[in-house]
Image (spheres, rainbow, N blue to C red):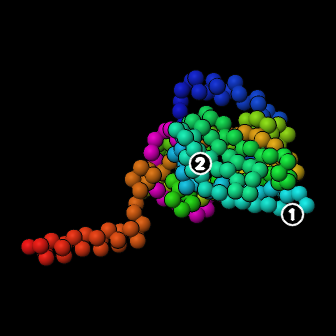
Amino acid sequence: MKLFKAISLAAMLAMAGAGAQAAVTVQKDNSNPFTIPGLTGFVTLGDDMTGMTVTARFSGVGDGPIEETLTWAATGAGSGGVTSTLGGWGLSVSGDTFSAAWEFTIDGQAGLGQLTSFTLDGGALNAFTVFDTSDPQPGTEGSANGRDFQFFGGCDNCDANVVYSIPVAIAPNAAVGDIYHVMTVNFLDDTGPATDFSFRQDTDNDARRSNPVPEPGSLMLAGLALAGLGVARRRVR
Protein backbone atom coordinates (compact mmCIF):
# COMPACT_ATOMS: atom_id res chain seq x y z
CA MET A 1 0.00 0.00 0.00
CA LYS A 2 1.02 3.58 0.20
CA LEU A 3 3.96 4.08 2.52
CA PHE A 4 6.28 7.04 2.75
CA LYS A 5 9.26 5.15 4.14
CA ALA A 6 12.50 6.16 2.44
CA ILE A 7 13.72 2.58 2.40
CA SER A 8 10.68 1.48 0.38
CA LEU A 9 11.16 4.28 -2.11
CA ALA A 10 14.84 3.45 -2.45
CA ALA A 11 13.99 -0.18 -3.15
CA MET A 12 11.50 0.91 -5.81
CA LEU A 13 14.11 2.99 -7.60
CA ALA A 14 16.73 0.27 -7.37
CA MET A 15 14.47 -2.31 -9.02
CA ALA A 16 12.79 -0.06 -11.58
CA GLY A 17 15.36 -1.03 -14.19
CA ALA A 18 14.10 -4.63 -14.30
CA GLY A 19 11.39 -3.69 -16.80
CA ALA A 20 13.04 -0.57 -18.23
CA GLN A 21 12.42 -1.56 -21.87
CA ALA A 22 8.73 -2.29 -21.36
CA ALA A 23 6.30 0.47 -22.32
CA VAL A 24 3.21 1.10 -20.21
CA THR A 25 0.53 3.70 -20.87
CA VAL A 26 -2.12 4.41 -18.23
CA GLN A 27 -5.72 5.31 -18.94
CA LYS A 28 -8.40 6.13 -16.36
CA ASP A 29 -12.13 5.73 -16.94
CA ASN A 30 -13.81 7.92 -14.32
CA SER A 31 -17.39 7.06 -15.24
CA ASN A 32 -19.71 5.07 -12.93
CA PRO A 33 -18.09 5.88 -9.56
CA PHE A 34 -18.77 3.59 -6.60
CA THR A 35 -18.99 4.80 -2.99
CA ILE A 36 -17.60 2.88 -0.02
CA PRO A 37 -17.49 3.75 3.72
CA GLY A 38 -13.69 3.88 4.01
CA LEU A 39 -10.40 2.00 3.71
CA THR A 40 -8.90 -0.51 6.14
CA GLY A 41 -5.37 0.89 6.35
CA PHE A 42 -2.06 1.25 4.54
CA VAL A 43 -1.08 -2.41 4.13
CA THR A 44 -2.82 -5.01 1.97
CA LEU A 45 -1.33 -8.50 1.79
CA GLY A 46 -1.89 -11.27 -0.71
CA ASP A 47 -4.41 -13.03 1.54
CA ASP A 48 -6.43 -9.81 2.02
CA MET A 49 -7.86 -9.84 -1.52
CA THR A 50 -10.12 -12.90 -1.35
CA GLY A 51 -13.12 -12.69 -3.66
CA MET A 52 -11.37 -10.61 -6.33
CA THR A 53 -11.81 -12.10 -9.79
CA VAL A 54 -8.97 -12.60 -12.27
CA THR A 55 -9.78 -12.97 -15.97
CA ALA A 56 -6.96 -13.98 -18.31
CA ARG A 57 -7.23 -13.97 -22.11
CA PHE A 58 -4.80 -15.85 -24.33
CA SER A 59 -4.38 -15.99 -28.11
CA GLY A 60 -4.58 -19.79 -28.07
CA VAL A 61 -2.83 -22.19 -30.39
CA GLY A 62 -4.91 -23.84 -33.12
CA ASP A 63 -8.31 -23.73 -31.41
CA GLY A 64 -8.62 -19.96 -31.12
CA PRO A 65 -8.62 -17.57 -28.14
CA ILE A 66 -8.85 -18.87 -24.58
CA GLU A 67 -10.44 -16.99 -21.67
CA GLU A 68 -10.81 -18.04 -18.04
CA THR A 69 -12.08 -16.25 -14.94
CA LEU A 70 -11.00 -17.37 -11.46
CA THR A 71 -11.65 -16.13 -7.92
CA TRP A 72 -8.76 -15.05 -5.70
CA ALA A 73 -8.19 -17.08 -2.53
CA ALA A 74 -5.75 -17.07 0.38
CA THR A 75 -2.92 -19.58 -0.07
CA GLY A 76 -1.01 -18.96 3.16
CA ALA A 77 -0.13 -16.29 5.69
CA GLY A 78 0.13 -13.05 3.71
CA SER A 79 -0.22 -14.87 0.38
CA GLY A 80 -3.00 -15.33 -2.14
CA GLY A 81 -3.63 -16.18 -5.76
CA VAL A 82 -5.43 -18.16 -8.44
CA THR A 83 -4.50 -21.33 -10.31
CA SER A 84 -6.09 -22.24 -13.63
CA THR A 85 -8.55 -25.11 -13.63
CA LEU A 86 -7.74 -25.63 -17.32
CA GLY A 87 -4.03 -25.76 -16.55
CA GLY A 88 -1.13 -23.64 -17.70
CA TRP A 89 -1.34 -20.34 -15.82
CA GLY A 90 -1.70 -18.71 -12.44
CA LEU A 91 -1.28 -15.43 -10.58
CA SER A 92 -0.09 -14.90 -7.02
CA VAL A 93 1.41 -12.38 -4.64
CA SER A 94 2.99 -12.77 -1.21
CA GLY A 95 3.39 -9.84 1.16
CA ASP A 96 2.50 -6.15 0.94
CA THR A 97 1.25 -5.28 -2.56
CA PHE A 98 2.97 -1.89 -2.42
CA SER A 99 6.40 -3.52 -2.69
CA ALA A 100 5.88 -7.22 -3.44
CA ALA A 101 5.88 -8.52 -7.02
CA TRP A 102 2.78 -10.20 -8.44
CA GLU A 103 3.90 -13.42 -10.15
CA PHE A 104 2.06 -14.41 -13.33
CA THR A 105 3.03 -17.94 -14.37
CA ILE A 106 2.45 -19.23 -17.90
CA ASP A 107 3.37 -22.73 -19.03
CA GLY A 108 4.77 -22.28 -22.52
CA GLN A 109 3.91 -25.92 -23.32
CA ALA A 110 0.23 -25.66 -22.38
CA GLY A 111 -0.99 -24.39 -25.76
CA LEU A 112 -2.20 -21.07 -24.40
CA GLY A 113 -0.21 -18.91 -26.80
CA GLN A 114 0.40 -15.30 -25.80
CA LEU A 115 -1.39 -13.50 -22.99
CA THR A 116 -3.41 -10.79 -24.76
CA SER A 117 -4.99 -9.14 -21.71
CA PHE A 118 -6.02 -9.72 -18.11
CA THR A 119 -8.48 -8.05 -15.76
CA LEU A 120 -8.50 -7.86 -11.97
CA ASP A 121 -11.91 -6.97 -10.53
CA GLY A 122 -11.73 -5.99 -6.87
CA GLY A 123 -15.40 -5.01 -6.79
CA ALA A 124 -16.77 -8.42 -7.71
CA LEU A 125 -19.30 -10.15 -5.44
CA ASN A 126 -17.74 -10.68 -1.98
CA ALA A 127 -14.61 -8.73 -3.01
CA PHE A 128 -13.39 -5.56 -1.27
CA THR A 129 -10.17 -4.62 -3.05
CA VAL A 130 -9.27 -1.32 -4.74
CA PHE A 131 -6.32 -0.52 -7.00
CA ASP A 132 -4.37 2.45 -5.71
CA THR A 133 -2.63 4.61 -8.32
CA SER A 134 0.02 7.29 -7.88
CA ASP A 135 -1.94 10.33 -9.10
CA PRO A 136 -3.44 12.72 -8.26
CA GLN A 137 -1.65 13.91 -5.12
CA PRO A 138 -2.96 14.28 -2.53
CA GLY A 139 -5.11 11.25 -3.13
CA THR A 140 -8.10 9.75 -1.37
CA GLU A 141 -7.97 10.15 2.39
CA GLY A 142 -6.60 7.00 4.02
CA SER A 143 -4.89 5.70 0.88
CA ALA A 144 -1.51 7.43 1.32
CA ASN A 145 0.94 7.05 -1.58
CA GLY A 146 -0.17 4.64 -4.33
CA ARG A 147 1.57 3.01 -7.24
CA ASP A 148 0.62 2.52 -10.89
CA PHE A 149 1.02 -0.81 -12.70
CA GLN A 150 4.67 -1.50 -13.53
CA PHE A 151 6.36 -4.52 -15.10
CA PHE A 152 8.96 -5.99 -12.79
CA GLY A 153 10.54 -8.89 -14.68
CA GLY A 154 10.17 -11.28 -17.60
CA CYS A 155 8.36 -8.80 -19.85
CA ASP A 156 11.09 -6.42 -21.06
CA ASN A 157 9.66 -6.17 -24.57
CA CYS A 158 6.01 -5.96 -23.59
CA ASP A 159 3.93 -2.94 -24.58
CA ALA A 160 0.76 -2.51 -22.57
CA ASN A 161 -2.17 -0.17 -22.10
CA VAL A 162 -3.44 -0.29 -18.50
CA VAL A 163 -7.02 0.85 -17.94
CA TYR A 164 -8.37 1.63 -14.45
CA SER A 165 -12.15 1.78 -14.22
CA ILE A 166 -14.97 2.11 -11.66
CA PRO A 167 -13.48 4.93 -9.58
CA VAL A 168 -14.01 4.56 -5.84
CA ALA A 169 -15.21 7.37 -3.56
CA ILE A 170 -15.14 7.51 0.23
CA ALA A 171 -18.51 8.63 1.61
CA PRO A 172 -19.61 11.41 1.70
CA ASN A 173 -16.99 12.73 -0.73
CA ALA A 174 -16.73 12.45 -4.50
CA ALA A 175 -14.16 10.17 -6.14
CA VAL A 176 -10.70 11.73 -6.35
CA GLY A 177 -9.51 9.59 -9.27
CA ASP A 178 -6.71 7.61 -7.64
CA ILE A 179 -8.43 4.40 -6.45
CA TYR A 180 -10.43 2.05 -8.68
CA HIS A 181 -12.20 -1.29 -8.46
CA VAL A 182 -11.06 -2.69 -11.82
CA MET A 183 -7.71 -2.86 -13.61
CA THR A 184 -7.32 -4.23 -17.14
CA VAL A 185 -3.94 -4.76 -18.79
CA ASN A 186 -4.07 -4.94 -22.61
CA PHE A 187 -0.94 -6.09 -24.45
CA LEU A 188 -0.33 -4.24 -27.73
CA ASP A 189 1.11 -5.32 -31.10
CA ASP A 190 1.51 -9.01 -30.20
CA THR A 191 3.92 -8.21 -27.37
CA GLY A 192 2.02 -10.24 -24.76
CA PRO A 193 4.14 -12.75 -22.82
CA ALA A 194 3.99 -16.50 -23.40
CA THR A 195 6.08 -17.35 -20.33
CA ASP A 196 6.31 -16.22 -16.69
CA PHE A 197 6.51 -12.52 -15.84
CA SER A 198 5.96 -10.28 -12.83
CA PHE A 199 4.59 -6.84 -12.09
CA ARG A 200 3.82 -4.46 -9.28
CA GLN A 201 0.48 -2.86 -8.41
CA ASP A 202 -0.53 -1.30 -5.12
CA THR A 203 -3.89 -2.22 -3.60
CA ASP A 204 -6.03 -1.15 -0.65
CA ASN A 205 -9.04 -2.77 0.99
CA ASP A 206 -12.56 -1.46 1.43
CA ALA A 207 -13.45 -1.07 5.14
CA ARG A 208 -16.41 -3.41 4.61
CA ARG A 209 -13.91 -6.28 4.51
CA SER A 210 -13.39 -5.80 8.26
CA ASN A 211 -17.07 -5.03 8.92
CA PRO A 212 -19.04 -6.93 6.28
CA VAL A 213 -22.65 -5.92 5.63
CA PRO A 214 -24.95 -8.97 5.84
CA GLU A 215 -26.79 -9.87 2.64
CA PRO A 216 -30.59 -9.29 2.66
CA GLY A 217 -31.21 -13.04 2.79
CA SER A 218 -28.98 -13.38 5.83
CA LEU A 219 -30.78 -10.54 7.58
CA MET A 220 -34.16 -12.17 6.87
CA LEU A 221 -32.97 -15.52 8.25
CA ALA A 222 -31.58 -13.82 11.34
CA GLY A 223 -34.92 -12.06 11.85
CA LEU A 224 -36.85 -15.32 11.54
CA ALA A 225 -34.48 -16.98 14.02
CA LEU A 226 -35.00 -14.20 16.56
CA ALA A 227 -38.75 -14.36 16.05
CA GLY A 228 -38.62 -18.11 16.66
CA LEU A 229 -36.72 -17.60 19.90
CA GLY A 230 -39.33 -15.09 20.98
CA VAL A 231 -42.15 -17.57 20.36
CA ALA A 232 -40.26 -20.32 22.21
CA ARG A 233 -39.74 -18.10 25.23
CA ARG A 234 -43.42 -17.18 25.35
CA ARG A 235 -44.38 -20.84 25.26
CA VAL A 236 -42.00 -21.66 28.13
CA ARG A 237 -43.53 -18.98 30.28
Q: Residue at x 61, y 27 (%)?
A: 9
Compared with 107, 15 (above or below) is: above
Give the label, 1 or 2, closer to the camera. Answer: 1
Residue 7 visible = yes
Spot occupied by residue 126 in the image (x, y as percentages of width and height): 51, 59
Amino acid type of the residue that numbered disc 2 sits on in the rendered structure = Phe
Question: Is 88 a magenta residue?
Answer: no
Name the side, left or right, on which 231 lies relative to 65: left
Residue situated furthest left in the rendering: 237
Residues 53 and 21: in front is 53
Q: Is residue 37 magenta?
A: yes
The vertical placement of 231 against 51, above or below, is: below
Decide which of 88, 141 is in the foreground and name it: 88
Check disc 2 and report its element: helix, strand or loop. Answer: strand
Question: Which picture quadrant has residue 233?
Answer: bottom left
Give the amino acid at mark 1.
Gly
**Residue that badge 1 annotates:** 64
> Which residue has dot 2 on it?
131
Q: Nearer the viewer, residue 172 or 89?
A: 89
**What segment is highlighted magenta in the picture?**
29-44
* Position of residue 119 in the picture relative to residue 63 (left or right): left
Name which residue lies at 46% across and 56% down: 36
| In the displayed structure image, the side of residue 116 where residue 210 appears, left or right | left
Q: Position of residue 54 (x, y in %)?
A: 66, 55
First reached walking from the N terminus: tag 1 or tag 2: 1
